[in-house]
Structures are given as C-alpha cells and as structure tokens.
C-alpha cells in the first residue's frame, strides 16, 4: 500500500510531520464537530436535544478518520462514510452545520483517490455519493444544495485521482529516462571495449608477426617485440578492468582517458613500427566528455592504420578553438578500413562525433593514403 503524497504546501514535511499535521487537523475537526452536534435544527424541523456525551462522541468520531487516513485509506473511508451518514441522517448535526462532516468525507475521499487502486476507489466513491446524497438530502431537502455537496465530494476524489495519475506519469517518465540512460551507458561501454581491444590486439598482432619473421636471424629484436607484446597486454588488461569496473556498483571510478593521455597512445602505436606525429594546437583544457571522445577516436583511427592501411607514417592533428575542436588523422597507406566504412570502429567514431554535433568524414585523402576528420562543438 502506498502512502499519500502531500500537496505542494506540505511536500517538504516528513511522514511524521504529516501525521502530526493530520492530528492537529483532527483536533480542530473534533471541536467543530462537537459544536455542530450541539446545534439544534431550524424550524420547522423537530427540535431534538441529544445528550451531551453524544455530541462529544460525534466530534471525536468525525476526527478519527483524519488521523489515520494516510495509514489505511480504504477502511478509513468506509468508517468516515458511516459516521457522516449517521450524523446527518439522524439529525445529530443539522443541515446548516453540515460543512464539518462534508469536509471530513471530502478529505478522506481525496486520500482514497491518491492511494487506493482505481477499481476499488471508483466503487467506494459511487457508494459514498449515493449514501451521502440520501443522508444530506434527508437533512437538507434542497436538491440544489445536495447537488453542490455531492459535487464537492466528487471533485475532491477526482483531484486525488488526478494526483495519482500524475505520480504514475512521473514514475513512468523516470523509468523511461533510466532505461534510456542505461542503454546509452551500455553503448558507451561497448564502444570503449571495442576501442580498447581492437587497438591493443592490433599492436600485439603486428609485433607477434614481426617476432615470428625475425626469430631466427634477429633474436634481440624478437625479444624486444615480446617485451612490447607483454607491456601492451598489461595495458589492455588495465583498461579492460577499468571499463568493466563501471559495471560494478562498488567499483572505484578510475580516471577516464583524455587529451593528456594521447602521448601514451601514440607511443603504443609507435611500438607497432608505425611512425606517428602528434600535434595539439590550442588550449588542451576541454570538457571531460570531449577529451574522452577524442582519445577514443584517435585510438580507433590508429588501430585502423595499423590493421588495414599498410602505412609507414601517420599524423594526428588537433586544433582547439573556443568551443570547437578539430581532429584529423592521416596516413600514407594504400587502404582504409574494410567493409566500406561500416565496421563497428567507424560506427563508434561517428556516434562519438555526433554527441558533440560532429559529422565524421573518413575516406581516401587527396594527397594519398587515408584520412579521418571531424569537428566537435561544445559549450564553454
């Protein structure tokens, strides 16, 4: 069972404070209910003076539902309906003092609208309207007055139902936003894993091939290749642990790579016998997301050069301006990525560029070789 959400005025109060507010409200209703029960009917109604204890009991019974309406809304509504019907139908409270029982029933039905399941809530309010109509009609015998009373009761329940629907909409919207965020996070992790594995495994594959060719004639160079393979493997494991660690709630968040880490990335590519020139122009202090995107895009571009381009040299140019970063990676090779540029690596690069309003261009360079270029835009 849910608990009624307080109104805008009371939203900052804790559950205990809300119950205390209801207790004060109930105390005021008990006093007003007692005073209303002491009133005598207006002529030509028969004047009936009930005992004093009955007036006190009526006030108390009217107040009790307000105290517990947030705890047990449905049973409380049935109890409130019984008390209000009895008080008005018996004449203990005259019709001109009926605003007190009307307010009690309306407040309780508001809570029913917010907290009780809709089918049971509808059944309860229909029964309440019928019985209240009979009781107030017997007391007032004025059709228009009875209509206003029933309208007020129904309106309070309707407001409660509208509040319930609004809460449900907020919950659904939050769930959809969470699901969208999870999907984006899964996509980000998939891109990171692809970039990490593809780059490091490409370096390892190249060095392993070199080691195999020179194993007999150049044992020193072979051992150097094995050392590069070992170091690259360790780096790959560290990055994989960092990426996979984001999936664990208890994981310590490791620093994400950025522009400052491009030097080590270039050194890793150079260990695969690729000459890489890196030039960064402008202020390297960019937002973290931009830095991560650039690092991963350069990583994927270098991976493609190592795997596909059969290039000897590669150049990475980064030009940073106010709110704009331009990235270009060119090589002197004879081929680009396989699959007409539809591999997962290039798809990931396009997605990263799109996050910052960029459109990735990847294809043969007019001066020969292969070129990858994009412009990322971000707010300062």
Image: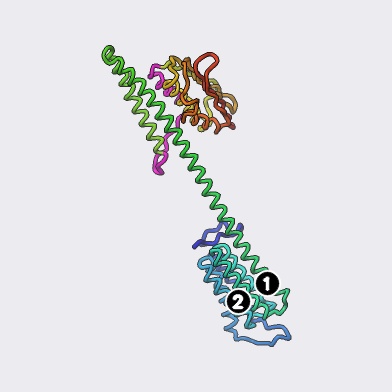
Mark 1 secondary-structure assignment: helix
For the point 40% across and 42% down, the residue is 248
The answer to whether mark 2 and mark 1 are in CB contact below 8 A is: no
Q: Quick check: 380 left or right of 314? A: right
Residue under circle 2?
84
Q: Residue at x 52, y 22 (%)?
A: 372
Q: Which of 254/150 is in front?
A: 150
Tell me which residue sits at (33%, 19%) in the image: 209
Question: How many residues crowd mark 2 within 10 Å: few (<14), some (14–19), many (20+)?
Answer: many
Q: Can residue 257 be seen in this view?
A: yes
157 part of magenta stretch: no
Q: Residue 92 location, x and y as percent?
A: 63, 82
The image quadrant of residue 311 is top left
Residue range corresponding to the magenta coloring: 246-273
Residue position for label 1? 149
Q: In this view, does 178 lie to the left or right of 44?
A: left
The crowding category of the residue bearing disc 1, from other C-alpha atoms within 10 Å (few below 14, some 14 to 19, many at least 20), is many
Cα–Cα gap, marks 2 and 1: 13 Å
Secondary structure under the numbered disc 2 in the rendered image? helix
Please name the residue shown 60% across and 62% down the image.
160
| Colour scheme in use | rainbow
Is residue 239 toward the left or the right of residue 352 in the image?
A: left
Q: As displayed, is residue 235 above or below residue 50? A: above
Q: Where is residue 43 in the image (x, y as percent from the top left)?
A: 73, 85
Q: In which quarter of the image is residue 356?
A: top right
- Nearer to me, 187 or 99: 187
Name the image quarter holding the C terminus: top right
Q: Quadrant of residue 275?
A: top left
């Amino acid at each position: 069972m849910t608990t009624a959400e307080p109104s805008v005025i009371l939203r900052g109060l804790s559950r205990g404070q809300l119950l205390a507010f209801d207790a004060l409200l109930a105390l005021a209703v008990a006093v007003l209910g007692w005073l209303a029960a002491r009133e005598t009917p207006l002529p030509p109604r028969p004047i009936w003076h009930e005992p004093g204890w009955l007036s006190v009991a009526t006030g108390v019974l009217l107040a009790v539902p307000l105290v517990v309406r947030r705890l047990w809304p449905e049973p409380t509504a049935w109890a409130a309906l019984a008390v209000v019907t009895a008080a008005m139908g018996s004449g203990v409270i005259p019709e001109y003092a009926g605003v007190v029982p009307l307010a009690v029933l309306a407040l309780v039905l508001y809570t029913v609208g917010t907290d009780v399941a809709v089918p049971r809530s509808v059944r309860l309010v229909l029964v309440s309207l019928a019985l209240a109509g009979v009781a107030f009609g017997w007391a007032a015998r004025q059709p228009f007055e009875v209509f206003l009373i029933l309208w007020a009761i129904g309106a309070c329940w309707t407001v409660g139902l509208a509040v319930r629907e609004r809460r449900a909409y907020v919950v659904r919207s939050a769930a959809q936003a969470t699901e969208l965020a999870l999907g984006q996070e899964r996509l980000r992790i998939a891109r990171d894993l692809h970039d990490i594995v593809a780059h490091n495994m490409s370096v390892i594959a190249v060095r392993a091939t070199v080691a195999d060719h020179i194993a007999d004639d150049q044992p020193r160079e072979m051992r150097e290749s094995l050392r590069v393979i070992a170091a690259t493997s360790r780096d790959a494991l560290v990055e994989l642990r960092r990426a996979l660690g984001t999936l664990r709630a208890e994981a310590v968040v490791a620093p994400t790579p950025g522009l400052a880490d491009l030097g080590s990335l270039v050194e890793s590519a150079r260990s695969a016998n690729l000459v890489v020139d890196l030039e960064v122009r402008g202020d390297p202090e960019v937002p973290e997301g931009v830095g991560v995107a650039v690092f991963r895009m350069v990583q994927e571009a270098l991976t493609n050069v190592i795997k596909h381009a059969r290039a000897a040299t590669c150049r990475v140019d980064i030009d940073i301006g106010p709110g704009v970063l331009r990235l270009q990676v060119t090589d002197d090779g004879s081929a680009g990525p396989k699959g007409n540029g539809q591999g997962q690596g290039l798809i990931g690069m396009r997605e990263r560029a799109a996050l910052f309003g960029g459109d990735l261009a990847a294809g043969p360079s007019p001066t020969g070789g292969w070129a990858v270029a994009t412009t990322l835009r971000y707010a300062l």
